[in-house]
Each structure stands twice: as C-alpha cells, then as structure tokens.
C-alpha cells in the first residue's frame, strides 16, 4: 500500500509551513529593522554637529543617539513654557503660509495630535462606533462641535474619522451625536484594530 503523499500535497504543506514561519518572523524582523534604522539615522544626523564641538578622539559611537534622546526630553519639557509655546505658534503660522508645505505639515500635525493625548484624556480623542443598519464602523471623534468647522448647526453634529483597514485611507463623516456610540477602548487599542483589520494578538 502506497502511503506517500502526492507531490502537490507535499508542496502545499511545505508552503503552509514557510508561510507560518514568515508570519512569525516578519513582525519581529520589521520591528528590529525599524529600530535599527531609527538609531542609525539619528546617529548619522547628529554626529556631524557633535563633531564640531567634540573632537574625533573623544567622540564615541552612540553619542548622537544619546544626544537625540536628551534633545527630545528637553523639547518635551520646554513646550510647557509660555514663551516657547508662543515661539512655536509663531513659527507654525509662518509654515502654514507656505503653499504645499502647509498641507503636508497640517496633515502630519493633525494625525500626531489624534494619536497623542499628552497624558491627558481629551474629549476630542475618543473612540466610537458608527451604526449603519446592523453594521458598526470604528471611528475617532476629531471634533465634538462640527459647527466650528462651518458644518452643521448647534452642538449636535460631530466629526468622526473612519479609518480604512491597514491605514490605506479613511473618511471623515459628520453625524448627529445620536448616531454614534462611545466604546471603552483606548486610542492605541483602536488604532491597532484599524491598522490590522482586527487581526491582532493579545
């Protein structure tokens, strides 16, 4: 009796095993590569100005990365100062006057503000579901009072961003508050669900 598996079945099982290996290694590999790329890029950018102050004999690899962390920490502390906030606001006004640049900058700024609560719970950054028939869509409230944007009237209309899976796009819809339902998820948890189309580990 021939118990050998057909060649097609063998190749199918082999492909399945390889796919499982790829799915296991890919997230880890991409994470390591991203961290490595971020460290190398930071080191390369900051090493040049550091070498203007420190001679090559006293410079050691990784100094740029350390300076980068210190710089981020100092900036994080400085933005709480009134004078610094005013200066940043003035600089932002100048950037927003430049065509094309203002569009890119405003989009990146608004997205970072969406995912960063700054350690505070903001009513403008809550997770909701939008009901369409029996279907529910995951969304983020970006404006509690859409009338401030010139859309709707009164305080009944809210702006909700509905991301598409794998963050290939999304839609901003304007709905009455009665059409949305708050859910008990953090911004990070909801973003992870949206980015992975719900395919996520614990």
Image (cartoon, rainbow, N blue to C red):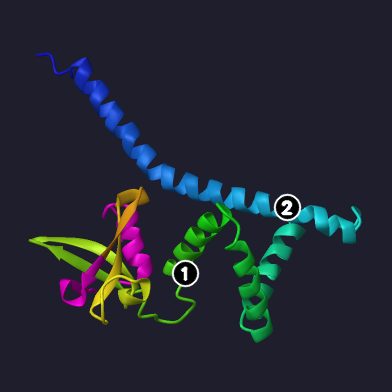
**Is residue 19 a member of the stretch shown in magenta?**
no
Say which residue label 1 marks: 113
Which residue is rendered at x = 30% and y = 51% of the image? 165
The foreground one among 82 and 188 is: 82
Q: Can you tell which mark lies on residue 155? A: none
* Horizontal side of residue 15 vs 63, given as left or right: left
* Horizontal side of residue 91 vs 189, given as left or right: right
- Chain part drawn in magenta: 174-202
Alpha carbon distance from label 1 to label 2: 25 Å
Q: Secondary structure at mark 1?
A: helix
Q: Can you tell which mark lies on residue 45? A: 2
Q: Position of residue 41 (x, y in %)?
A: 66, 50
The foreground one among 59 and 191 is: 191
Q: Does residue 81 sit above or below 171 in this rendering?
A: below
The foreground one among 132 and 39 is: 132
Which residue is rendered at x = 47% and y = 69% of the image? 113
């Amino acid at each position: 009796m021939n118990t050998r598996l057909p060649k097609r079945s063998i190749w199918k099982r082999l492909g399945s095993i390889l796919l499982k290996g790829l799915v296991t290694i890919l997230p880890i590999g991409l994470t390591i590569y991203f961290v490595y790329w971020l460290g190398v890029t930071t080191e390369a950018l900051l090493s040049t100005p550091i070498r203007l102050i420190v001679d090559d004999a006293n410079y050691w690899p990784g100094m740029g990365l350390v300076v980068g962390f210190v710089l981020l920490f100092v900036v994080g502390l400085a933005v709480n100062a009134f004078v610094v906030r005013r200066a940043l606001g003035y600089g932002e006004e100048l950037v927003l006057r430049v065509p094309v640049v203002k569009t890119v900058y405003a989009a990146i700024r608004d997205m970072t503000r969406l995912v960063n609560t700054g350690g505070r719970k903001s009513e403008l950054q809550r997770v909701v579901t939008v009901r369409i028939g029996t279907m529910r869509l995951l969304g983020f409230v970006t404006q509690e009072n859409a009338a401030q944007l010139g859309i709707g009237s009164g305080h009944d209309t809210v702006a909700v961003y509905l991301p598409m899976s794998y963050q290939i796009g999304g839609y901003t819809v304007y709905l009455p508050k009665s059409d949305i339902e708050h859910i008990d998820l953090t911004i990070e948890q909801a973003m992870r669900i949206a980015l992975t189309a719900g395919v996520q580990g614990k």
